[in-house]
Amino acid sequence: MATKQGNDRLAVLIDADQGQHGVLQELMSEISRYGTGTIKRAYGDWTEQNMSKWKGLLQANAIQPVQQFRYTKGKNATDSALIIDAMDVLHAGVVDGFCLVSSDSDFTRLATRIREAGLAVYGFGERKTPAPFVAACDKFIYLEILKPEAEPVNVSALVDAPALASVPSVEEVDEATIAELPELQPLVLSALEKTARDDGWSSLAALGGQINRDHPSFDARNYGFTRLGDLVRRQAYLQSKEVASGENGQIHLHVRRQ
């Protein structure tokens, strides 16, 4: 189903057991860049006391809480409930894409299955998210960059941080499987080589699209820049120019290797 990004109907499915309530408002704002959340659900065991912080935020964003009891200690029934609902929504054909909000690799196959059906998958999770889930999404956004005045965070430092030692999902994941931020220069130059015309120039839109295809987690904000254009202008190995096109003289940024 081919639709114009920004007008897509999206199913927003949140694994609330992962605890992203502190950035929920920013998350919903980010999702609005890709489309409209026509289905918005948050899954968790709402009888647990630690889930009470979600109540006001869910109401403010019109998100439906879905109750899922933990039948067995140490087992997460929330994942299964979310996956079942996602497949129901997929087969109903009422949305153009999915926003899966979780840092759990258990949703890797779900993301792959949705993409096989021709729908877009936007993933949202913490930097500890395992690489397979990140790669399974069309686009993956780290929640850390959505926080106000967020700073780029070293992934290895996050994995080793004592504050994360009590989080089971981190302990259970081999550090080698964590999706690390790729080194910027090789990433950009590789994409530039694929998109450049005979004269060496590539449009910023083409460059950004190729980088995202190569690395779904790429986002200029991961590297401390608000926009991709700002990022490429600051790279000494790149040359940029503004080109007016169309009758209205709209300005487009073009990039080539220095």
Image: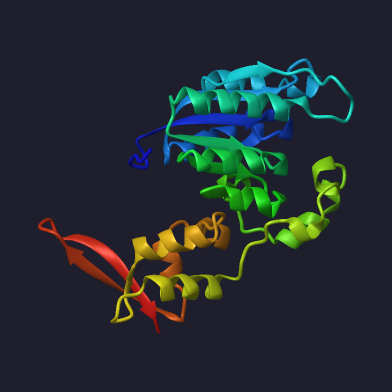
In the rendered image, the quadrant that contains the N terminus is top left
- Find residue 106 and report its horizontal and vertical position in percent: 72, 40
> The C terminus lies in which quarter of the figure?
bottom left
**Residue 167 visible in the displayed image:** no
* Residue 36 left/right relative to 219: left
User: Where 195 sits versus 67, above or below?
Assistant: below
Measuring 85% from the left and 47% from the top, which residue is drawn there?
A: 172
Which residue is outermost to the bottom?
A: 258
Q: Position of 251 compared to 48: left or right?
A: left
Q: Residue at x 61, y 56 (%)?
A: 151
| Residue closest to the far right | 73
Q: Number of numbered discs present?
A: 0
Work out whether 142 lies above or below 197.
above
Q: Is residue 74 visible?
A: yes
Q: Measured from the top left, where is residue 160 in percent x and y?
A: 83, 57
**Left or right of 26: which side holds 73?**
right
Give residue 45's position: percent from left, percent from top. Answer: 75, 20
Q: Is residue 156 above or below residue 149?
A: below
Q: Residue at x 35, y 60 (%)?
A: 205
